[in-house]
Amino acid sequence: MNVSVMLTKIIFIMKKLLCFVFVTLMCFSAFAAAPQTGNATYYSKKCRGITSSGERHNPDSMICAHRTHPFGTLLKVTHLGNGKSVIVKVNDRGPFGRGNVVDLSYGAARKLNMVRQGKAKVKVEVVDPNSINDEAIMAEVTE
């Protein structure tokens, strides 16, 4: 086989591969930003220790665990049963239970009025930190 023919085939395959990778990445990034609906659970009030991000877990902080969002991402979690919302910061990985989309700190679960039930149906949305005008909310999330 001629060298120029081989090079042409290799370039053709590389272009197809790059196109596939690009389309795949675009699909995953669009999926990651889309709101999620599922169950939220929460950490016990007694839970202490170090999270996957290396931060110390404080049960009263507005923090959560999410499987895919990067550490530091702000999420708005809305309890679909009562309409209450809270903004939390991702600092851990999980939940790994089937149907669960987020694990909340005890403090966040308390604000959503879901402590008695143990879990709740929620909608999870990514929040742009620049869109939060309330200094009290930002102070809770970044403490």
Image (tube, grey):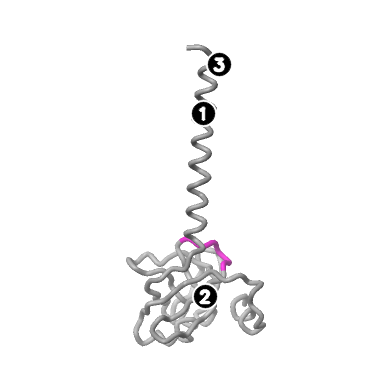
Does residue 69 show up magenta in the picture?
yes
Q: CA distance from mark 2 to mark 3?
A: 55 Å
Image coordinates of residue 70 in percent, x first then y, are: 54, 61
Q: Mark 1 falls on what kind of element?
A: helix
The residue positioned 54% from the left and 22% from the top of the image is 8
Query: Which of the 4 quarters of the picture holds residue 41?
Result: bottom left
Q: Mark 2 falls on what kind of element?
A: strand
Of label 1 and label 2, which has the lower sequence position? Answer: 1
Image coordinates of residue 79 in percent, x first then y, are: 43, 81
Kind of residue at disc 2: Lys
Kind of residue at disc 3: Ser
Q: Main secondary structure of the magenta part?
A: loop
Judging by the rendered image, the residue that carries numbered circle 3 is: 4
Image coordinates of residue 6 in percent, x first then y, are: 51, 19
Quadrant holding the C terminus:
bottom right
Residue range (magenta): 68-73
Q: CA distance from mark 1 to mark 2?
A: 44 Å
Judging by the rendered image, the residue that carries numbered circle 2 is: 76
